Amino acid sequence: MPFLRLIFVLALVLSCSTTPKADLIVYGRVWTGDSANPWAGGIAIRGDTILAVGDSAAVASHGGPDTRQIGIPGGFVTPGFMDDHVHLFTGGFQLTSVDLRDADTPAEFTRRIKAFVGRLKPGEWVLGGVWDHEKWPGTPLPDRAWIDSVTPDNPVFILRLDGHMALANTRALAAARMDRSTPEIPGGSIVRRADGELTGVLKDEAMNPVYAAIPTPSAEQLDSALAGAMRHAASLGVTAVASMVTGWEEIAALRRARERGALSLRVANYLTLASWRSAADSLKSAGPGDDWIRTAGVKGFVDGSLGSTTALMSEPYRDAPGTRGLFVTPEDSIRQWIGAADSAGLQVVVHAIGDRANDLLLDIFDSVATAHGARDRRFRVEHAQHLRAAEIPRFAALGVIPSMQPYHAADDGRWASKRIGPELIRGTYAFRSLLDAGARLIFGSDWYVAPLDPRLGLEAAVTRQTLDGVNPGGWVPEEKITLEEALRAYTVSNAYGVFAEATRGMLKSGYRADFVVFDRDLTAIAPDSLSDARVMLTVAGGRIVWDQVKVP
Ligand SMILES: [Zn+2]
């Protein structure tokens, strides 16, 4: 009997290992991201791993009595979208805060704040907001006088959508002990009225005193922001993000979600460059983590943004000739911290928007790499927004990754030409030129700054239409890329951007089961209707995290 039982068990093990049964099979047109085998008719997964990607007969052979099998007529499958630049928790908080993104008059701006404050307790802060004064042509920057009378009991500190300036009301300024006697702050700018009084608008580093006065969110508040952010990501087909974190408390919230079995999004965390030592210590003592929660590296800033006229340019702004932008971090510190973080084995990613900021950062990356010797370090320039022709080939030559956000092009394209001249406009969001020069282009949203939705990013990269509808043929149309190139940036290349290409970014046997199913073939629809495609199913690590298949 024991012998017979052994034979039986062996036979069972053998049959299982030769034809393992799938938990889930999805049939449809599959874009795999694997250039050796880019198209398939279905995908079979088991546990958190892809069993097979192939024609429908090949994947069907993995079906068993317990396999869920899904076929969506006309459906389209891609690897799970990765977003290589988000502010995950700020984005999560923004989901439940006042929404000013499309407030298109100052009166509407005030009305929405008034309505929102009505739901709060006295003393509660109003944060987020993400307003855009470019929606109010001819109107100067907002002033606390617009909102003081409707917010007598609540401090308000609401961001412009680029995160590089904010409006504080009088209560928030008082909490930060800022008034007309406050001196200028290096790396920032305090906007004043003609009489020297503060308007409440603070740019870049000048925002810090108010940030310091905002109570830190509780663990419960962080948990609920994360839950909202994860639901939002799943609904959009986003299965992994690179998160620019503000501190360890965000990583602690990710760990709590994981302990509850609720983590549905893979997060590579980038701590601030200034805190490189704490990131390095953690790397040494706890290791980098795994492919759900990872301490990936550090993120710093060279300059501000074009929208706030703080991006560091080689020429004065056309509409603000008194400035060429500013260093958000002193040049010496940037250089020193990048060197130290690189020595500690951290991946270093740095924000640079203006042409001068990009040029300088490429110089620093070059000199650090030369001094420290060859290593797979994958330096990234976050945004790489305005490049001179001579800077474009340097990305490929130095192996530096341009980490770009196509939706910003659709947004900034409305007004960028009033700030910068035609030569710089040509090198603005230079997707095509960077790819042609051999750079490995990666994509993200910069959520909360822009919507998290990858469909909007794809559409912006492929059409380069601007949000105002003024450029139907595309703004700087020479820089358009194809849909497949844009998909590649969001998947295969984004995996490379966070050192995850050995297991993610492609649909391939043995890779992680992270994928999205759309209701229509993205390659067969008009590029300006990409954002109409519906996300039917999102699978992260083999788990269905968004399911619209049964919903009519
Ligand atoms: Zn950002």
Image (spheres, helix red, strand yellow):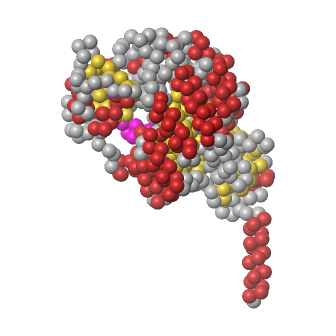
Residue pictured at 44% horizontal, 40% vertical? 274
Image-based side of 184 in relation to 69, left or right: left
- Could you say which is closer to the camera, residue 128 or residue 17? 128
Residue pictured at 65% horizontal, 19% vertical? 389
Which residue lies most toward the bottom here?
A: 1
458 over 228 or under it: above or below = above
Q: How many marks?
A: 0
- Could you say which is closer to the camera, residue 341 or residue 42? 341
Q: Is residue 439 among the parts visible in the rendering?
A: no
Image-based side of 484 in relation to 386, left or right: right
Residue 443: say if magenta: no
280 over 311 or under it: above or below = below
Q: Position of residue 506 (x, y in %)?
A: 69, 45
462 over 245 or under it: above or below = above
Q: Position of residue 51 (x, y in %)?
A: 71, 56
Residue 422 occupies quadrant: top right
Q: Position of residue 57 (x, y in %)?
A: 79, 52
Give the quadrant of the C terminus. Answer: top right
Residue pictured at 37% horizontal, 30% vertical? 205
Residue pictured at 79% horizontal, 43% vertical? 36
12 over 449 or under it: above or below = below
- Could you say which is closer to the camera, residue 264 or residue 197? 197
Q: Is residue 374 among the parts visible in the rendering?
A: yes
Q: Position of residue 142 (x, y in %)?
A: 33, 20
Residue 93: say if magenta: yes
The residues colored magenta run 91-98
Give the quadrant of the N terminus. Answer: bottom right
